[in-house]
Image (cartoon, rainbow, N blue to C red):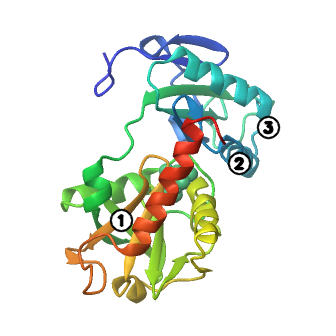
């Protein structure tokens, strides 16, 4: 029995399908020793993966960035994911994929000759955010971004993110919003959006943030709703004076941020409550998921 995990889901490890409790890797796996690996989290609604092509594209970019040859091509990943969904229960699932550089003698340099990468995939039950969370929003704190300078890689080495999230929890908030040199980067495990005067603002897609699959979705939704989008550097002071703040992530979909550092977010008409742009985006987001569930995407 593993703490926090119900039942014994079937996982994929290096070509085999095994119960989670039997999935074992070497202590010399470079993922364990160095955090030398990358991962993806793909949500599936009504047993259909959402925006799989974008997730697989990002997986491929992460692998290339850390110089691991893709162990599977897109068609093979798609088949693996279909089987993972098939072998597990639950209409809505999270599909976690991880690739590490593999097992070798502990040495910082890459193993030579190359070793087989470790491939791991598991499904966990996904409960989309509750009505309460969607309607009441979440509290965040601001923190300096103390992570490395390759946050665009979805690396398993997440210590900076983990410590930021833990600080948020210890201060009674749900998430940490990070700032580097006085400018917004992202959340510990999400992208952050600011609404000001009817315009949706997001930070540049560069090495300082992970470009979420929902980043692209938000751009598509904003375009469809004729909400202007500005992608630029955003000062911390602007975030403090935002009309609305939103976050996006596979696990959180899109949620309103209603308090930051214990102060209400938003202008007087909706201070401390989700704002009008959130509601518009929320509705459009739900419609997209509704289409996916109905097999219309
Ligand atoms: C650091 C970070 N930024 C952004 C995101 C959002 O990415 P996505 O929309 O693909 O879930 C995540 C997701 O977990 C994340 O961990």
State which quadrant residue 30 falls in.
Answer: top right
> Residue 195 location, x and y as percent?
45, 79
Give 257 or 228, whichever is nearer the viewer: 228
Disc 1 residue lies near ligand 1 with CB under 8 A: no
* Marks 2 & 3, CB-CB < 8 Å contact: no
The quadrant the N terminus occupies is top left
State which quadrant residue 297 falls in.
Answer: top right
Residue 66 numbered mark, or none: 2
Residue 59 numbered mark, or none: none
* Mark 1 surroundings within 10 Å by alpha-carbon count, few (fewer than 14), some (14 through 19), many (20 or more): many
* Mark 2 surroundings within 10 Å by alpha-carbon count, few (fewer than 14), some (14 through 19), many (20 or more): some
Q: Nearer the viewer, mark 2 or mark 1?
A: 1
Tell me the residue that label 3 is attached to.
69
Tell me, yes or no, if residue 103 can be seen here. no
Tell me, yes or no, if residue 234 can be seen here. yes
State which quadrant residue 137 falls in.
Answer: bottom left
Which sits earlier in the primary sequence, circle 1 or circle 3? 3
Measure how far apart labels 1 and 3 are at the Cα level. 39 Å
Give 36 or 184, whichever is nearer the viewer: 184
Measure how far apart labels 2 and 1 are at the Cα level. 34 Å
Q: Secondary structure at mark 1?
A: strand
* Mark 3 surroundings within 10 Å by alpha-carbon count, few (fewer than 14), some (14 through 19), many (20 or more): few
């Amino acid at each position: 029995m593993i703490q926090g995990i119900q039942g014994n889901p079937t996982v994929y490890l290096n070509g085999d399908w095994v119960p989670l409790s039997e999935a074992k890797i070497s202590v010399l796996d470079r993922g364990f020793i160095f955090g030398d690996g990358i991962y993806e989290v793909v949500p599936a609604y009504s047993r259909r993966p959402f925006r799989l092509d974008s997730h697989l594209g990002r997986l491929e970019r992460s692998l290339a960035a850390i110089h691991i040859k893709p162990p599977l091509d897109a068609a093979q990943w798609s088949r693996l994911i279909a089987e993972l969904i098939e072998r597990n229960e639950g209409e809505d699932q999270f599909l976690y994929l991880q690739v590490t550089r593999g097992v070798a003698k502990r040495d910082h340099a890459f193993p030579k000759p190359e070793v087989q990468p470790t491939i791991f995939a598991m499904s966990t039950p996904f409960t989309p955010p509750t009505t309460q969370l969607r309607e009441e929003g979440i509290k965040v704190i601001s923190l300096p971004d103390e992570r490395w300078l390759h946050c665009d890689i979805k690396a398993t080495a997440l210590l900076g993110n983990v410590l930021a999230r833990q600080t948020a929890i210890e201060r009674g908030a749900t998430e940490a919003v990070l700032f580097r040199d006085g400018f917004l980067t992202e959340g510990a495990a999400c992208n952050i959006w600011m609404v000001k005067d009817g315009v949706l603002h997001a930070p540049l897609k560069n090495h300082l943030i992970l470009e979420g699959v929902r980043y692209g979705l938000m751009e598509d939704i904003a375009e469809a709703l004729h909400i202007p989008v500005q992608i630029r550097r955003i000062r911390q002071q602007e975030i403090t004076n935002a009309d609305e703040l939103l976050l996006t992530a596979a696990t959180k979909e899109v949620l309103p941020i209603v308090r930051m550092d214990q102060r209400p977010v938003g202008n007087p008409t909706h201070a401390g409550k989700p704002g009008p742009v959130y509601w518009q985006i929320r509705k459009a987001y739900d419609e997209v998921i509704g289409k996916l569930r109905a097999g219309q995407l």
